[in-house]
Amino acid sequence: MEDCIFCKIAAGEIPCRKVYENEKVLAFEDIHPMAPIHVIIIPKRHIATLMDVDAEGMADLQSMMSAAQEVARVEKVDQKGFRMVINCNKEGGQVVFHLHMHLLGGLRLKNGLA
Ligand code: 5GP
Ligand code: ZN
């Protein structure tokens, strides 16, 4: 996808601080972290939003969740705990329209949405 920042990161055209990678997914540090640990997990192929995930995309989501487990181990929050977030579309706060998960950790996260 032209002009998709996460496609460019996946292609190595824009640098990132990589945390984990396999053939289907890439995980990298968020450029504006909202927690001491803030990792973005993306499928390497372009899917715009959670609502665009079809049957084939479900395999990508599965890979992203597996990657999240690995990222949690790498970041040493697998036992302490962490939070996963997917923002979808405008009211969900999605800014980058390439499907991604946020893995947040490294502090005691409060319950609540804001
Ligand atoms: P969204 O609000 O779409 O769920 O989250 C997009 C996230 O991507 C934001 O937390 C933002 O800081 C992060 N982000 C946007 N552009 C870049 C970039 O070029 N590099 C990295 N590492 N993160 C980015
Ligand atoms: Zn993309």
Image (spheres, rainbow, N blue to C red):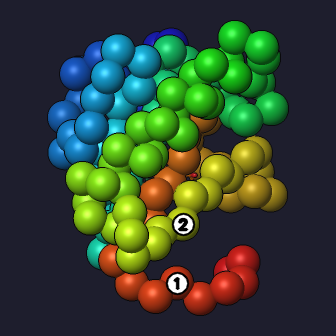
Residue 76 in percent (x, y) is at 26, 64
In the image, is residue 58 above or below residue 27? above
Evaluate if marks 1 and 2 touch, with contact meaning CB atoms under 8 Å apart. Answer: yes
Residue 70 in percent (x, y) is at 35, 44
Residue 89: image quadrant is top right
Amino acid type at circle 1 is Leu
Instruction: Count numbered badges in the picture.
Output: 2
* Image quadrant where one finds the C terminus: bottom right
Residue found at the very far front of the displayed protein:
79
Mark 2 C-beta to ligand 1 under 8 Å? no
Q: Residue at x 38, y 63 (%)?
A: 78
**Residue of label 1:** 109
| SS at circle 1 | loop
Q: Is residue 4 left or right of residue 35?
A: right
Residue 3 in percent (x, y) is at 46, 22
Q: Residue at x 35, y 31 (%)?
A: 26
Disc nearer the start of the sequence (1/2): 2
- Residue 12 can be seen, yes or no: yes
Camera-nearest residue between 110 and 73: 73
| SS at circle 2 | strand
Residue 107: image quadrant is bottom left
What whole-number distance in Å separates the C-alpha atoms at marks 1 and 2? 8 Å
**Residue of label 2:** 83
Other residues around mark 2 within 10 Å, as few (<14) / some (14–19) / many (≥20): some
Other residues around mark 1 within 10 Å, as few (<14) / some (14–19) / many (≥20): few
In the image, is residue 65 above or below residue 5? below
Camera-nearest residue between 2 and 75: 75
- Residue 34 can be seen, yes or no: no
Q: Residue at x 50, y 15 (%)?
A: 45
